[in-house]
Amino acid sequence: MTPQELNHTWSILQQIMDISRSKGADATEVIYARGNGLSLKAEKGAIAESKISGSQTCGIRITKGDRVATCYSESMDENALEQMVSQAMENTAYVKDDPLQKIQDLGQIELNNLSPKNFSQDDTSIEKKIELSLALEQKILDKGPEVKNAPYNGVSESEGHSFQANSFGLKAYSRSRSFSCYTSALIDSNGKQSMHYHSSIARKFSDLDPQSCIDKSYEVASGLLHGSPIPTGSYDVIFEHDTLAEFLSLFSIIFSARSAMEGKNPFKDKINTAIAPKFLNLSDIPNYADAYGESLFDSEGFLHRETSLIEEGVLKTFLHNSQTSRYFDTANTFHASRTSRGTLGVGSTYKVYGPGPIPEQQLFDGEVFYVIDLQGTSSGSDPISGDFSFGASGFILVNGQKQRAVKGVTLSGNFYQILKTLQLAGDKIHPDTSRSIFLPKIRFEKIKIAGT
Amino acid sequence: MIPSQIAEEVIGCGLGLGAEFVDIFVDKSSSRSIRILDSKVNELGGGIDFGIGIRLLFGTNVVYGHTNLADLDELIRITRLLAPLGRQQMSKESNVLANFKLNPQQAFINHHPAIKGINHAFPLEQKIAFMQGLDKFARNSSSQISQVDISLGERLQQVQIFNSQGLCTQDERNYIRLYTSCIAEKPGERATGSEIPGAMAGYEFIESLNAQEIGERIASQAITKLNADHCPAGKMPVILGNGFGGVIFHEACGHLLETTSVQKKASVFWDKMGEQIANPALSACDDGTIAGKWGSINIDDEGMPTQKTQLIKDGILTNFLVDYVGHLKTGHARSGSGRRQSYKFAPASRMRNTFIQPGSYSLEDLITSVDHGIYCKTLGGGSVQPGTGEFNFSADECYLIKNGKIGKALKTATLIGTGPDILKKISMVGNDLKYSAGVCGSVSGSVPVTVGQPSLKVDDILVGGQA
């Protein structure tokens, strides 16, 4: 954005706060998010779909006495902004008193997140992007006659700018730019079908790794083509990094102070108690060196800092904002999270697990089910009870060597019980594809698999 | 919303830049949400979504862009940005603006009128009182209920659709949905119950609901699950309850009949038109016309009046769900199924109210036909991989069936299979058709859909239990 555009945006935010004050709000917080993007998809050797997007949303949170209300608008004309503020003011008449939720008075401060880890200049031409999009389809088809199609493939680019201001003088700005590419291999041979999808993300177009997308999509789809169910029983399970990150994320409610405040976090009474074996350590690290980006401040304007969530198996704290820290009468961890449309919540930055005690290779001793893909993770998990039941596919490994491909099975259990009985975690840390979770390989013992 | 003259200039510009088809989707949504937590009004929010999507077609190549600004200069700017992306594929050059005129606006007939839509002056206090009443009924059902969370979402979507075939039309869609859930607890264990009714209607839909019945039902579901045994694991016969049980057809078959997958041959049914793909006991429809249903529409998001589409008749595949691009790519007639979440998405063929048509059996007939299996009374969500037909869905409240009788309650489990296989194993179809509201996510975003079915028997499906 040009300096003129930046100044113009700040003046609109000031205008909204002026309207809000004139309508009787005690304090106002405004978040304005603006983004644009490009995406391309190939089909049969040509670009079949191109998309250019531009969007903006402005959202306010106001306080009137002890009451808090929100409203948002995608339209930025004066009438729409007036209407947004009026609606929020009307809403304060109906909501409960919430003296613990405040708009923070941090004085006149200016925060800018201009980290090159979040945003890099990039002048890659559209022709290059089209070329990559076409290659993501063609190179899958070139893998062999058994490849029927690459039905899902594409290249995309997005840029986002976030402005946050409050009536006490906070001005916070951050920006980000991302590129991604993905492809899939649909293999059809002798009446059997198999498909796999893989993606790559980067801050610079040149840092994308399309070859890994092509190779991994093909290798996994091809490897699972003749997969079949294994006999129903209990198996030791190791998840591939992305799958493990997905699995653990389904139960991340256990770190949310807001969920605890709302009576939904099953670990609401477990602070300073052991929830996992001693080897398990987990920290939230906003500036982790290998992470995809860098987060400098939270949605209330507080500077982020490293937070230890689990130490030697003991749950040390939840992720807090100012409201939840008041509710629990404990220290704020500065993890406030709010989008322009939403209410005040909490969110993590980059989660980094510590290494386990076992040499990674040793985890694969004997027979394990190595899970490459889970299906139905959202509908098949209940973070409140901890129960899960998913479709799964992968390989049976014996001493690390592939013995057979497995698909058409389910994997089920209770996450919170499993967490307590973990014994085997590897000594190396791996990132997931999005480089937002860093974790060791873990061998889960005796997980129920339903198959033949 | 925009005057038709602006639409004419933008379409003219797109045609002048070489596009063979241009359409414009103007979308304004006003929404409000109320949340009751801890028996109090915890949140009250909402807002306005507004934007315009422009689509240019060069042959079957789609270029799509959107903006939040409604002025002519911005829309022309977007169109000029889009055209070169499409032309790269067509090597077509033209810079002459066409003198384009729309047809007179088509008469607007609202088949799903809302009496008490979001802008109706219905007292907010009464809505809050209904929700707090429901909260109380759930809490009073058992001392084991530790939390109740209720939200009411209301939305009015106003759309205008213009295209280069002269189309000029508009629609108003009122959506309302009640989200109810509760948690039951005993030492060391927790379970949830939920129900999420919705309709294309105003608040009159909520007035038709019984707060006591819903409150007691969600509490009973949570308590039942809290005390349930582990579900057995392995292949067995399953009776799927009516209503949200229809998610099995939605996932196992519905998505595979959308031209979004069919046109890429990324559906296992792409070449099966006219063939027997299901047990002859099974017929199924996708019907956008049912009055007031959550997945209903007057016109689709490409401006075509919606219709009832017979997908499968006596086990034979009779129709796909076809949007405009799907029609161009496959040759099948459009079915009024071009849908999208908002202006941020190009339309794609999507389901509306999809259901298995009723058969002749009672639920008791189905249960007594099973020696050892499970009865899934309520189901949760699911997903499918269209290319392979592999689907999954979760059984939320289920019971063991032994010797033709319903027995003890079981914990939740996921059921998996492949579409072509499972359609042939639906052997008995009940006579108790019921619908349930859901949200379906796919290439054109999340759209309201209804799933429906009578109770039915699947002879053999893999149940992902823990026992």
Image (spheres, coloured by chain):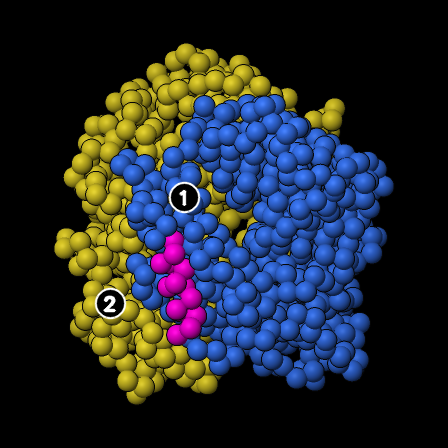
Task: Tell me if B181 is positioned left or right of A165 in this view.
Answer: right
Residue at image location 55% in from the left, 25% down from the top: B402
* Magenta region, residue range: B125-139
Percent x, y of residue B396? 49, 40
Percent x, y of residue A157? 51, 55
Percent x, y of residue A344? 31, 62
**Mark 1 closeness class: few <14, some 14–19, many ≥20 residues within 10 Å:** many
The chain whose colour is blue is B
Task: Tell me if A167 is positioned left or right of A430 in this view.
Answer: left
Count the numbered circles shown.
Answer: 2
Relative to A143, residue B348 above or below: below
The residue under label 2 is A98
Percent x, y of residue A147? 69, 32
The residue under label 1 is B222
What's the distance in space between the residues labelled 1 and 2, CA to CA? 29 Å
The chain whose colour is yellow is A
Residue A255 appearing in the image: yes
